[in-house]
Image: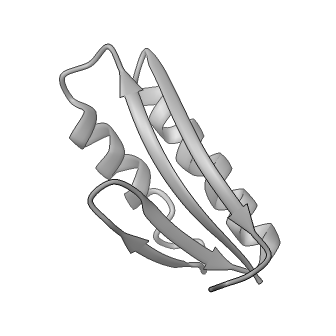
């Protein structure tokens, strides 16, 4: 089991909320636990699914924003 706290920061856009929500929607069917907070999202699940979800999250955000920054903290502890 792996846990990850992730924050997305779309740059140079006025649609950051839409970009973030679209990116989060893209990982809902990945078989992971996902708790969305006001500043970050907590994700946990099997390692391969969490890493795949992070890739999808980043790819979706970067497709919809000129520049994007993603900050992740990854742990092999769920707590």
Res 49 → quadrant: bottom right
Q: Could you say where residue 78 lies in the image, as x and y percent from the top left?
A: 66, 84
Residue 22 position in % (x across, y down): 34, 48
The location of residue 54, given as percent across then percent down, is 63, 53
Residue at 71% x, 58% y: name it: 52
Q: Position of residue 7 (x, y in %)?
A: 46, 48
In the image, is 8 to the left or to the right of 76?
left
Q: How many marks?
A: 0
Q: Is residue 36 left or right of residue 14?
A: right
Residue 31 horizontal side relative to residue 50, left or right: left
- Name the image quarter holding the N terminus: bottom right
Query: Who's the residue at 38% across and 28% down the image?
Result: 10
| Closer to the camera in the image, 25 or 46 | 46
Q: Is residue 43 above or below residue 70?
A: below
Say left or right for 55 vs 6: right
Quarter of the figure with the C terminus: bottom right
| 18 vs 30: above or below | above
Tell me the colour scheme of the image. Answer: one colour
Q: Residue at x 43, y 15 (%)?
A: 66
Hey, which residue is sitting farthest left in the picture? 14
Q: Nearer the viewer, residue 5 or 21?
A: 5
Residue occupying image coordinates x 42% and y 48%: 23
């Amino acid at each position: 089991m792996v846990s990850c706290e992730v924050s997305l920061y779309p740059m140079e856009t006025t649609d950051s909320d839409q970009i973030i929500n679209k990116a989060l929607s893209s990982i809902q069917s990945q078989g992971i636990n996902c708790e969305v907070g006001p500043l970050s999202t907590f994700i946990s699940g099997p390692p391969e699914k969490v890493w795949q979800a992070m890739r999808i999250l980043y790819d979706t955000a970067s497709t919809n924003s000129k520049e994007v920054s993603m900050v992740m903290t990854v742990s092999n502890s769920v707590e």
